Structures are given as C-alpha cells and as structure tokens.
Image (cartoon, grey):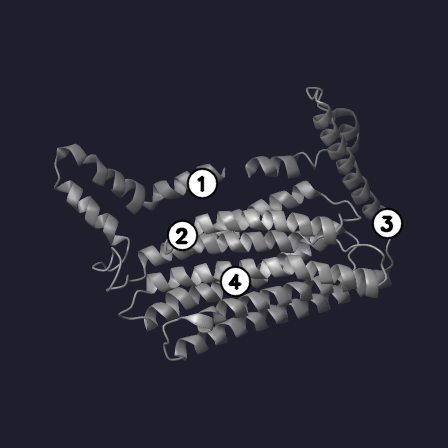
Amino acid sequence: MSHSFGESYRVGSTKGIHALTVFCSWDYKVTQKRASRVQQDSICTQLKELLAEWHLRKRPRSVCGQLRQVVVLGLGWLLCLGSTMGCTVAVLTFSEVMIQRPASGGQGVEALALPLVVSVLNLGASYLFRGLATLERHDSPVLEVYMAICRNLILKMAVLGVLCYHWLGRRVATLQGQCWEDFVGQELYRFMVVDFIFMLLDSLFGELVWRLISEKKLKRGQKPEFDIARNVLDLIYGQTLTWLGVLFSPLLPAVQILRLLFLFHIKKASLMANCQAPRRPWLASHMSTVFLTLLCFPSFLGAAVFLCYAVWQVRPSSTCGPFRTLNTMYEAGTVWVRRLEHAGSGASWLPWLHHFLVENTFFLFLASALLLW
C-alpha cells in the first residue's frame, strides 16, 4: 500500500508532470509487441487524465453556477445522510424485533430475514445515491467517485456497526445457555450468501434494466457508465464479513474465494454487455490507492477491533466450544503459559516471550508503527 501511495501521490504531484509524461514515460526495456501496446495505452490514458484535470481547472464558472452547485450538493448530502440514518434505525429496530420473537430454531425464512432486510436496504440506498449523483452533475469524475465512496462507505459502516452490536451485545445476552458462537458464525455465513445472491441479481438484471432505461426511455443512445465505487465497496463489504466471521466460522475464507471467482466472471460479462467505460478520463491510480486504504483501515481494522473485543471481553458459551470453562477466550493463552512454566526449564523462555509480546502492548504498538511507516 505504501508503494501505491508513492506512485499515486508523490509522483503525481511532481512539477512538470506533463513534460515528464511525454518525454520520460516510455520503458525501453519493453521489447514484446503486446507489452509495448499495453504501455502505449497506459501513457495515453495518463495524458488524457492530466489534460482533463488541467482543462477542468482552467474552466471558469459564474457565481450563480457555484451557488447552485453548493445548494444541490447540500440537499444531496442531507438526503443521503437521512437515508443512511433511516437504514441504520431500520436495521436496529428489526434486529430488536427478531430478538423479541419466540425462538423457533432459527430455521427457514426467519433465519434469513435480517440478511434479506440488510441486503435490500444496501441495494436500494446505493441506487438512490447513484440517482442523486446523476442529478448533481459533477464536473470532475474524481469528485463524483469520491462522493459515491463516502456515501456508500458511511452507509455500510453504520449498518455493520449496528450488526456488530447486535451480535456481541444483544445476542450474547439473550442466548444464555446456548452456543452463541455458532449463531454468530451461521449468521455471517447467511449474510455472505444473501449478499452474493443480491450481487448476482444486480449484475444480471439491475445493470440490464439500467441500460434499457438509459437507451430506450432517456434516449441517450449509449450504455450507462460502470459504477466503479459501488462495485468495489460491495467487494470490500463482502471481505469485511469474511474477516468478522473467521473466528466463528473458519471456512468462510474458502466461501469468499469461491464467491469472488464467480463474481469476477459474472461482473466481467455484465460489464461488457451492459456498461461502458467513463467518457471523461480520471486518475485511476489515485482511486486504487483509496480503495486499498479503505480495505485496510475501516474494513480490516474494524474487523480486528470486533474480534479483539470478542476474544478479550465477551464470555464464551458454557455449553460448547473449547473455551466453555473460561471467562474469556484470551484466558486460554494465559492457562497455556502457566502450564509451560511448570513444564521444565526447556520451555521457560515461552512465558517470558508471551509476557513481553502479548501482555505488554508497547512492543505491539512499536511493531505496528514500524510496519505502517
């Protein structure tokens, strides 16, 4: 990710980037015809991006036009934040209703009710955000993608935060005497399957319907552009579900791999049939860095906090699992270290290592800072 930051920002901010791109971009080590063609297309795209950005900065805009744009953006953001808050409250309310319902074994449609509601809200809100972006008519494609990223990210993080509270807060308290770890693992598996089904339906029918509306009703005579921000954030959302459930359902990464393989081929076919490339060039390298950052910090870091809280703070089930006799999952490591202390002198260094690397957080923070640097 640090290499991506360097390529996207440090190099992109160099003075005289237009001259450097024209005279210094070609790699003379490339000898194959296909590789040279790819490099030629890459340089051409980069020049289009730079010229489009330069032309956008030179374009004048009246005061009335700027005021109109600010008002439209403000109304759009109010509607987006209101819909996000409504979706969050709806998920929280529905999860409370599911808790208060009498237990029926968690089978059938009732077990899929919460995943279905969350997937419907995510899909409907994403189309609402897309329609608002069409009405706002941004001049910069980079700004348009950033706005879509922020809106979809706020929605998905808010919904996931409510779900994490539902699983480790409310469900653990109500499933006393039952195996709540199995419930959380099964719930995350259902979320992944339902999200996969909705992504398939959106690719096979949603983008097709959007193309027909654009060509037949709006009379544009061309296919709609591929929504890069929403599709990438959908992938990040699925990966976040995988990280959240890896402790409770260790086979979820295998399910995620199969899911990504199917989605790649289906999205590719839908992209070629129903969508077109953006008409206005934009800095794709910057966007790839942004997506990597979102995958690392909000997604991975949030899942790590969720799992650390489950390991350090939540009491395991008393009826199942290897931690049923302990107060927390973390105590298993402490018990193992105590046994090593009495095992003999050959393993005396392991308790010392556990104390300084696990219990003492200074070395953990130091290693994290070095890795981030």
The answer to which of marks 3 and 2 sits earlier in the sequence is 3
Q: CA distance from mark 1 to mark 2?
A: 25 Å
At horizontal 86% and vertical 55% (from top left) the residue drawn is 61
Give the SS element for disc 2: loop
Q: Position of residue 41 (x, y in %)?
A: 76, 34
Identity of the amino acid at label 1?
A: Ala
Residue 354's disc number: none
User: Are the residues at dot 3 and dot 2 in contact (C-beta closer than 8 Å)?
Assistant: no
Query: Dot 3, how many residues are within 10 Å of its Cα: few (below 14), some (14-19), or many (20+)?
Result: few
Q: Which residue is label 1 attached to?
A: 369
> Which residue is denoted by mark 2 in the rendering?
246
The residue lying at 70 percent from left, 50 percent from top is 271
Q: Nearer the viewer, mark 1 or mark 4?
A: 4
Amino acid carrying label 2: it is: Val
Q: Are marks 3 and 1 in contact (CB under 8 Å)?
A: no
Residue bearing the label numbered 3: 59
Q: Residue flagged by tag 4: what amino acid is it?
A: Val
Q: Position of residue 165 (x, y in %)?
A: 43, 66
Q: Nearer the viewer, mark 3 or mark 2?
A: 2
Few, some or many residues within 10 Å of mark 4 (<14, 14–19, 20+):
some
As measured in the structure, the alpha-carbon distance from the residue carrying label 3 to the one carrying label 1 is 43 Å
Residue 324 sits in quarter = bottom left
